[in-house]
């Protein structure tokens, strides 16, 4: 079995490295398409995969074709490759804001998987939510599961709406976390720590807290209560966070991202229609 990547950017490169390291595909069974010959040669020399600057050549190569181009150029890419897609091929999309209906209509192809990965996939700690059309067989779903698991964790959902929701929660989620980390580090610097020491304190505290929450089996409210003494420093800090609308702002941000996801999805539908 062979796999092709249409558009070989950061996320696709992370996926390629992961599936090679996991032994799912050999480099000789992988092809990536690129806009520029120079970049194609660099990746070929680094990852030892097949490379091309022709999207149609990449489609012809793979039994599985991963679409990882920018959503804005999907329509033109679809027009370029649709006549070369075989009925037996499995199409996997990791493009944000392009739903299954739009993929099927533009590619004239029914066997489609839609995924929403996130950036920690670059270090194999990602979370990918995905769905598949009814034409995708169980054996093919198992292959998709292996591919996505090589980048971290995966979650299959029957209803595509959950992929849209995941775009706002886990897809965009790293940005929320990074802003939180940045703010906490800045607070540490304001107190008098060097930036390096503040980063170490914040990153390791955050990592430890997440692992603790995952392994304890307790509700986060219970864990929070464990470190909150009446009249203590934690209680005072949490009071300020609540007074500032920390929860409300975060929940509104996630919902705003979700609404934007739906808007962009409809926009892409109209473009393709």
Image (cartoon, helix red, strand yellow):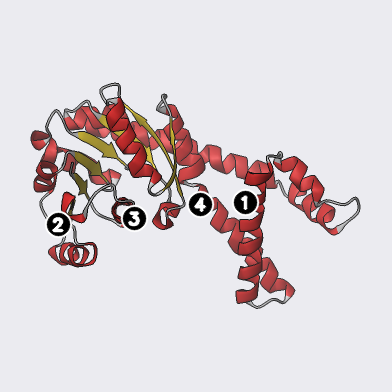
Residue 152, percent across and down?
44, 48
Residue 91, percent across and down?
23, 36
Mark 2 Cα-neighbour bin, 10 Å: few <14, some 14–19, many ≥20: many
Q: Which residue is mark 2?
A: 51
Residue 14, labelled with which disc?
3
Q: Earlier in the sequence, mark 1 or mark 3?
A: 3
- Mark 2 vs mark 3, CA separation in Å: 16 Å
Mark 4 Cα-neighbour bin, 10 Å: few <14, some 14–19, many ≥20: some
Q: Are marks 2 and 1 in contact (CB under 8 Å)?
A: no
Residue 97 in view: no
Q: Residue at x 37, y 43 (%)?
A: 148
Left or right of 144? Residue 33 is left
Q: Residue furthest top?
A: 134
Camera-nearest label, 3 or 4 = 3
- Mark 3 vs mark 4, CA separation in Å: 16 Å
Residue 133 in view: yes
Q: Residue furthest front?
A: 23
Mark 1 Cα-neighbour bin, 10 Å: few <14, some 14–19, many ≥20: few
Q: Earlier in the sequence, mark 2 or mark 3?
A: 3
Left or right of 230? Residue 84 is left
Q: Residue at x 67, y 50 (%)?
A: 212
State the SS at label 3.
helix
State the SS at label 2.
strand
Q: Residue at x 42, y 53 (%)?
A: 124
Q: Which residue is mark 1?
A: 211
Q: Is residue 238 above or below residue 163?
A: below
Q: Earlier in the sequence, mark 4 or mark 1?
A: 4
Residue 177, percent across and down?
56, 53
Q: Which residue is mark 4?
A: 174
- Name the quadrant containing residue 112: top left
């Amino acid at each position: 079995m062979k796999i092709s990547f249409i558009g070989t950017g950061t996320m696709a490169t992370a996926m390629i490295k992961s599936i090679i390291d996991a032994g799912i595909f050999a480099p000789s069974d992988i092809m990536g398409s690129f806009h520029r010959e120079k970049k194609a040669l660099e990746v070929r020399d680094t990852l030892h995969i097949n490379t091309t600057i022709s999207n149609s050549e990449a489609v012809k190569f793979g039994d599985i074709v991963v679409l990882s181009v920018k959503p804005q150029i999907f329509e033109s890419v679809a027009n370029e490759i649709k006549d070369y897609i075989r009925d037996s091929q499995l199409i996997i999309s990791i493009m944000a804001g392009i739903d299954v209906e739009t993929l099927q209509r533009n590619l004239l192809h029914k066997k489609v998987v839609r995924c929403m990965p996130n950036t920690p996939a670059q270090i194999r700690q990602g979370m990918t939510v995905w769905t598949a059309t009814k034409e995708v067989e169980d054996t093919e779903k198992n292959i998709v599961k292996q591919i996505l698991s090589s980048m971290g964790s995966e979650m299959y959902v029957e209803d595509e709406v959950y992929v849209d929701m995941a775009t706002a929660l886990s897809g965009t989620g790293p940005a929320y976390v990074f802003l939180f980390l940045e703010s906490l580090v800045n607070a540490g610097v304001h107190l008098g720590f060097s930036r390096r020491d503040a980063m170490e304190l914040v990153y390791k505290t955050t990592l430890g807290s997440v692992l603790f929450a995952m392994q304890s089996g307790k509700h986060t409210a219970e864990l929070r209560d464990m470190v909150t003494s009446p009249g203590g420093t934690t209680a005072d800090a949490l009071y300020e966070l609540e007074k500032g609308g920390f929860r409300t702002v975060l929940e509104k941000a996630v919902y705003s991202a979700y609404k934007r996801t739906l808007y962009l999805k409809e926009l892409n539908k109209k473009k393709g229609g």
